[in-house]
Amino acid sequence: MTSTSDNLLVKFRTKDTALGVTRSTVKALAKELEVNETQVIHMALSKFAADVLPAYAPDTGPLTAKQIRALREDVQKHLPKGKTLSSETLFP
């Protein structure tokens, strides 16, 4: 059983706007998707969270000089070797 703090009262708008929808819109979505109204709200919030919240943790700041040196050394192992056959520039 869920506690009272796990529930949320949703107050619907009197008309559909960019910031909210009417109960009839939620009912229409539920009918179209063949789910109940609660599931429609969960689906909408899930999509909104995916669009708004970052998908990864924030970085820890700039790289240290030691990390930059290590990356430069590592990249040298993976760069192609030999004569350049052709080159292009994006900006003249």
Image (cartoon, rainbow, N blue to C red):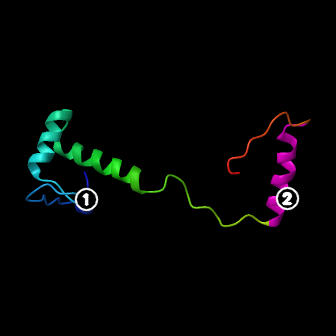
Q: Quadrant of residue 52?
A: bottom left
Look at the image and say whether residue 71 sits in the magenta stretch: yes
Q: Main secondary structure of the magenta part?
A: helix
Q: Earlier in the sequence, mark 1 or mark 2?
A: 1
Residue at the spot 17% in from the left edge and 44% down from the top edge: 37
Q: How many marks?
A: 2
Residue at the spot 17% in from the left edge and 40% down from the top edge: 29
Q: Nearer the viewer, residue 2 or 88?
A: 88
Look at the image and say whether residue 78 sits in the magenta stretch: yes
Q: Quadrant of residue 69?
A: bottom right
Q: Amino acid at mark 2?
A: Arg
| Residue under numbered circle 1 | 3
| Residue under numbered circle 2 | 69
Q: Amino acid at mark 1?
A: Ser
Q: Quadrant of residue 67?
A: bottom right
Residue range highlighted in magenta: 65-81
Residue 91, given in percent of the width and then of the height, sits at 68, 51
Which residue is situated farthest in the front direction here?
A: 92
Q: CA distance from mark 1 to mark 2?
A: 54 Å
Sort mark 2 into few (<14), some (14-19) or many (20+) by Cα contacts within 10 Å. Answer: few
59 horizontally vs 42: left or right: right
Relative vertical location of residue 78 with respect to residue 92 in this rendering, above or below: above
Residue 75, given in percent of the width and then of the height, sits at 82, 47
Say which element carries label 2: helix
Relative vertical location of residue 77 with respect to residue 16 in this rendering, above or below: above
Residue 74, given in percent of the width and then of the height, sits at 84, 47
Say which element carries label 1: loop
39 horizontally vs 64: left or right: left
